[in-house]
Amino acid sequence: MSGGTFVGMPAFPKAAHEALGNAQLRHNLAHATGTIRAKRLRLVDEVNANSSWEELRLAGAGVKESALVDLATHLERLEESLTANGATVHWARDAAEANAIVASIAKGHGVDEVVKVKSMVTQEINLNEALEAEGIAAWETDLAELIVQLGEDLPSHILVPAIHRNRSEIREIFLAKMAGAGRPAPEDLTDEPAVLAAAARAHLREKFLRAKVGISGANFAVADTGTLVVVESEGNGRMCLTLPEVLISVVGIEKVVPTWEGLDPLLRLLPRSSTGERMNPYTSTWSGITPGDGPQEVHVVLLDNGRTNALADEVGRQALRCIRCSACLNVCPVYERTGGHAYGSVYPGPIGAILNPLLKGPGADEQTDSLPYASSLCGACFEACPVRIDIPSVLVDLRAQVVDAHRGGVPKLEAVAFKASAVALSDARKLAFGERFTRLGLRVARRFGASKWTSSRDLPPAPPESFRAWWKRTDGGRR
Amino acid sequence: MSARDDILRRVRAALDGVEPGYAVPAAPRIAPLDDVVGHFVERVEDYKAVVQRCSPADLADRVTAALPDGARVVVPAGLSVAVPGADEDAGFGAHELDGYDAVVTEARVGIAETGTIILDHGPGQGRRAISLVPDLHVCIVRADQVVPDVPDALPLLDPARAHTWISGPSATSDIELNRVEGVHGPRTLVVIVVEAAP
């Protein structure tokens, strides 16, 4: 069983417009993001009471930046230490290579199912669909991922992929779909969150206990020690990382942290920014194979899939510091209203609006090109980001890159308008001449050409007289 | 060119002209805590774990009292307290472990600020699976194992070992971002803090 993919999604303005028509979605999102925003702020205040949140952010950003500026060295070191710890390291340029590696390992063990820890990167590469094509069922075990998978839905949030679903919708999905995937939901299932969680526990238990192959991502990969780290809440991660005989972890090359001690600011920043907790319930660390404990065959797939494109972008490079906490989604006024699906990617919200174009490159497709515009540039995301990614600056830079990528073809109406204004503004006499026609121009614009511009902005009312006419009449306000 | 060499080449090309050295600002430390163990107890309780404090002499009784009557209990090799009727882990499979109601372990470190216990799965702690599959985890932490914050804990750990950091019982925030305790990990966590008499 798999959900859909984001392939073929419309550009943001169209998708957002449709999402805005869904009142239930807006209600679910406002409730959920409001809850998490309040929790995060309480913890930031708590940190500031006996330490400094800003200094912690600077340290966290610094650890990630220090890894990125010397990434090749740290990746080689990571490979070396993982190998010394008994893990097998694979490298994948893109999604197809990574999926082929995972499928081939799973098939080598003759399994027809695998259990999965929630992982953004395996969604990015559509691993579940690739495995399904090879006859292998990939069971999502995170509660929200299970809701999305059973509902044949798409994820809409980095941390809580089913954030767009409320409790009664989740109950309906469990009642209708659990039986088709294994143990059915109890008939007397209510919409109490604790009851729904208990149903997921019972449903997934049999899958955990019999699993031969587990698949995970990693929140961090420590180069010096060859340690992978997975941060989670439910214990499904521990199940997948501990009980199977074989563990395959797909890790983006930007997940590297140079040293074990470097985990410190990140493990303090991530849970507070993500779920609004001082610490998430469970964090697992493992360094290759631990004799007699857990999987005795451990694979790590190091994935590029566009990350080196992002790394080459001087302004955008900082997006690779992202630790996938989703604080920027929760504070974003655009995300809160449109939801995650409108972004057409597993990475929605402000970080998605920069990460997707950076991974794919500007000019890749209309949908990706529309994302840098999916923002009011209010700056709330930068303020909330635990690793200080200046998302608004990257958005502005990407907008310029998108415009540049489309130079040479038929110019857009907007470009023609700005070219005309450049002519008018370059010369005082031309400007004086032009100003006489402002009222006429705005009236014409309102009737014809500017509907694309004004669909998302207000066109100002034309003044009764031009500034020059006013200056002349009043002698600069003295009369 | 292999995928490995190709990716490393692309990384180097992307960073052409970028200085590799980067001075990482030191992470701030929290202000000293007056009562580290008291802070730890408060924070562990905050995440819905049951916390008890006792003297070494009372430990065995406290552990027994934390286990329901008739519960099937598994313990790791090297546990410093005797648990009557418990089975010592003999490399049980997942299904066998599922037949146990409870597990008793020790820990390696406690973190006061975050209410976290860390297991490094050495003697007295056992394999990762035994503290995961049973529904009740009774975890013994010595008061002298509790440190103020995360940066105090990391240097005490050996990265070559597997670790499990535990902050409260299994939980989820996946339904409307409300925290609900009890999903796949142990649904009940009892932390017993052992303090030598002053």
Image (cartoon, coloured by chain):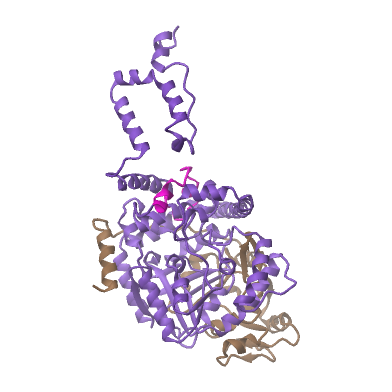
Chain colours: A purple, B brown
In this rendered view, identify the residue nearer to me: A122 or A240.
A122
Given residues A187 and A162, the one toward you in this image is A187
Residue displayed at 64% across by 92% down: B87
**Is residue A418 left or right of A59 when viewed as pictured?**
left
Number of marks in the image? 0
**For the view shown, which residue lies furthest in the top direction?**
A479
Q: Can residue B195 be seen in the rendering of this structure?
A: no
Give the residues drawn in magenta, as a range.
A366-390
Q: Is A378 within the magenta?
A: yes
> Within the magenta stretch, is there residue B193?
no
Percent coordinates x, y for residue A209 in the rendering: 58, 84
Instruction: Answer with the quarter of the image where residue B136 lies.
Output: bottom right
Q: Residue A93 location in percent, x, y?
A: 33, 68
Q: Measured along the vertical axis of the image, is residue A333 above or below residue A115?
A: above
User: Which is more toward the observer, A346 or A313?
Assistant: A346
Which quadrant of the rendered structure holds the N terminus of chain B?
bottom left
Residue A22 in the image: state x and y as whole percent: 60, 50
Above-or-below relation of A352 to A426: below
Residue A226 falls in which quadrant of the image?
A: bottom left
Is B23 situated above or below B55? Answer: above
Residue A235 can be seen in this image: yes
Between residue B33 and residue A77, name the one nearer to us.
A77
Please give the name of the residue rendered at 33% of the width and 73% of the height, measured from the top-left corner: A91
In the picture, which quadrant includes the C terminus of chain B?
Answer: bottom right
Q: Is residue B145 left or right of residue A321?
A: right
In the rendered view, does A223 fall on the left or right side of B190? left
Q: Is residue B130 left or right of residue A255?
A: right
Query: In the rendering, at what x and y percent does residue A215 appear?
Result: 47, 76
Q: Is residue A328 above or below residue B59?
A: above
